[in-house]
């Protein structure tokens, strides 16, 4: 089984509406997002999927959140902008963008808001 992974980043502000503590106040992070895809074999080019294409999809999604207040951007106008919910957003959106045979191999989306901690969503 092969696994490939790409990463992107975005700088954004947010606050947690249903939280008591420092994170209830507007603050910022340099978020890192990673997605991983697995496949049982490689194609004719010797690749699971072109890194360039996989990263392009992820960067397009991450750019939506760069230098904004996440609480002002859908879907985080309705749900908390936690790393967990962001990971779910990236997973669901990447699944829509990948070719059907590859979307079934999407393992996870992982979002880190600071070094040493991350949230991951997958099937």
Image: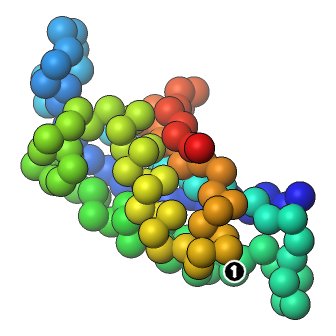
Location of residue 119 with respect to 33 vertically, above or below: above
Q: Quadrant of residue 105?
A: bottom right
Coordinates of residue 78 in the picture (x, y in percent): 14, 41
Most foreground residue, 46 or 116? 46
Q: Residue at x 57, y 43 (%)?
A: 122
Outermost residue on the bottom side: it is: 44
Q: Is residue 39 toward the left or the right of residue 67 in the image?
A: right
Most foreground residue, 70 or 44? 44
Location of residue 50 with respect to 116 vertically, above or below: below
Question: Residue under circle 1?
Answer: 50
Q: Residue at x 28, y 58 (%)?
A: 66
- Report the colour scheme: rainbow
Label 1 residue SS:
loop
Location of residue 43 with respect to 100 vertically, above or below: below
Coordinates of residue 65 in the picture (x, y in percent): 27, 57
Q: Is residue 90 toward the left or the right of residue 7 in the image?
A: left
Most foreground residue, 60 or 48? 48
Q: Is residue 71 visible?
A: no
Q: Is residue 25 toward the left or the right of residue 22 in the image?
A: left
Coordinates of residue 96 in the picture (x, y in percent): 45, 69
Q: Residue at x 44, y 44 (%)?
A: 87
Q: Is residue 56 visible?
A: yes
Q: Is residue 73 toward the left or the right of residue 53 in the image?
A: left
> For the N terminus, which image quadrant?
bottom right
Q: Residue at x 12, y 44 (%)?
A: 77
Q: Quadrant of residue 23?
A: top left
> For the C terminus, which image quadrant?
top right
Q: Quadrant of residue 113?
A: top left
């Amino acid at each position: 089984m092969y696994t490939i992974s790409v990463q992107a980043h975005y700088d954004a502000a947010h606050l947690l509406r249903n939280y008591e503590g420092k994170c209830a106040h507007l603050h910022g992070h340099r978020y890192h997002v990673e997605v991983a895809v697995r496949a049982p074999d490689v194609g004719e080019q010797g690749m699971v999927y072109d890194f360039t294409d996989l990263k392009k999809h992820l960067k397009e999604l991450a750019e939506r959140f760069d230098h904004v207040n996440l609480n002002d951007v859908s879907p985080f106008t309705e749900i908390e902008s936690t790393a967990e919910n962001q990971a779910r957003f990236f997973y669901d959106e990447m699944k829509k963008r990948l070719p059907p045979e590859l979307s079934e191999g999407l393992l996870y989306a992982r979002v880190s808001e600071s070094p040493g901690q991350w949230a991951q969503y997958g099937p």
